[in-house]
Amino acid sequence: MVVEGRLTYSSSSCGGIELGRNDYDADEGRLTATIRWYYERPSDADCTADEVTRAYRATFPFDDGTPEAVAVTEDGNTGTFEETAS
């Protein structure tokens, strides 16, 4: 299962995108994932004050088929957006 999208976050020099919480409920056949931004300022560097939008691709391997439903939450600094597909 591959989830792709775009996320906007602050500071292209000190920010980035990471996989947050993810869970698979086999009884419901539902994958739930959060893609979020992080801010990490190095002690020896200044961070830019810009906003950047970058693409992401998260891969979730399954041995037996794919989930019946997928719910993804994108948590960026411009807001939180949820998308569910089945």
Image (cartoon, rainbow, N blue to C red):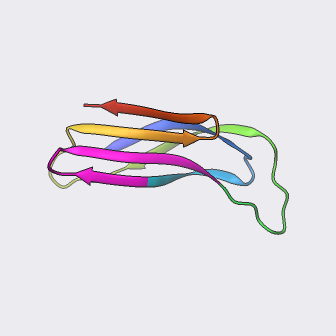
Q: Is residue 2 magenta?
A: no
Q: Is residue 21 left or right of residue 64?
A: right
Q: Is residue 85 left or right of residue 44?
A: left
Where does residue 3 sit, x and y in percent of width and height?
39, 41
Which residue: 77% across, 65% down? 42
Q: Looking at the figure, which quarter contains the C terminus?
A: top left
| 8 lies above or below 17 | above
Q: Is residue 53 left or right of residue 13?
A: left
- Magenta segment: 21-38
Classified by dominant secondary structure, the portion drawn in magenta counts as: strand
Where does residue 41 sit, x and y in percent of width and height?
75, 61
Q: Looking at the figure, which quarter contains the N terminus?
A: top left
User: How many numbered marks does the figure carry?
Assistant: 0
**Front one among 80 and 31:** 80
Which residue: 39% across, 47% down? 33
Which residue: 34% across, 38% down? 71
Which residue: 59% across, 35% down? 79
Where does residue 18 sit, x and y in percent of width and height?
53, 53
Where does residue 37 sit, x and y in percent of width and height?
59, 48
